[in-house]
Amino acid sequence: MKSTLILALTLSVLAANTFAADGYDRTGSATLAADGYDRTGSATLAADGYDRTGSATLAADGYDRTGSATLAADGYDRTGSATLAADGYDRTGSATLAADGYDRTGSATLAADGYDRTGSATLAADGYDRTGSATLAADGYDRTGSATLAADGYDRTGSATLAADGYDRTGSATLAADGYDRTGSAYIG
């Protein structure tokens, strides 16, 4: 009877230990994965039960492809701290993006098609800079200095008076009726 009691006591002590489903003790204090094996430390489990991550963020398929940078649309890290272009690549610094997402500019103003063709000068109608600081003629070309423009936009004058057709045929003398200067300093009759 005494031996039966010792045997029963031994069995009750053994029964107090935790067993896995098949009766073997495979566990310590670690967490079990779905199939009963201990594949983890303190890291987060990916969807299939393997530990592929450190402390980084998981990409969509459970792999750790990122550091602390922002994820592009397909889960890869293609960026630093710069802005993402429309397709997820980082093509820019701190400059402004042109319409197609490429950085073609510095700090200059963009022309209508997104290229930087200008300095600080005024743009002509087609977006090219043909001028310095002078006034633009009607077709956008700079044909003048600081002189007055004739009717067709050409500068044919100095400081003299313009004749009716826009040509300067005079010096400082008086104009005759047809616009020609036939005199020096004489009186015109």
Image (cartoon, rainbow, N blue to C red):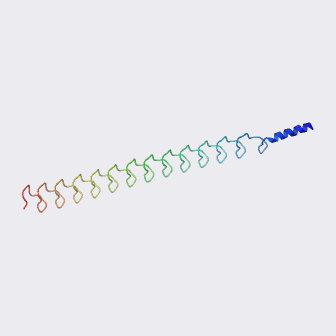
Give percent across and percent down for residue 110: 38, 52
**Would residue 188 appear left or right of 9 to someone viewing this image?**
left
Location of residue 78 with respect to 2 vertically, above or below: below
Residue at the far right: name it: 1
Location of residue 2 with respect to 89 vertically, above or below: above
**Would residue 139 appear left or right of 84 to someone viewing this image?**
left
Q: Quadrant of the C terminus?
A: bottom left
Closest to the observer, 130 or 14: 14
Give percent across and percent down for residue 13: 82, 39
Give percent across and percent down for residue 14: 82, 39
Closest to the observer, 45 or 35: 45
Closest to the observer, 182 or 10: 10
**Would residue 183 appear left or right of 41 to someone viewing this image?**
left
**Would residue 64 appear left or right of 179 to someone viewing this image?**
right
Report which quarter residue 50 is drawn in.
top right
Q: Residue at x 86, y 39 (%)?
A: 9
Give percent across and percent down for residue 20: 76, 43
Report which quarter residue 170 is drawn in.
bottom left
Q: Residue at x 84, y 41 (%)?
A: 12
Q: Quadrant of the N terminus?
A: top right
Q: Residue at x 85, y 40 (%)?
A: 11
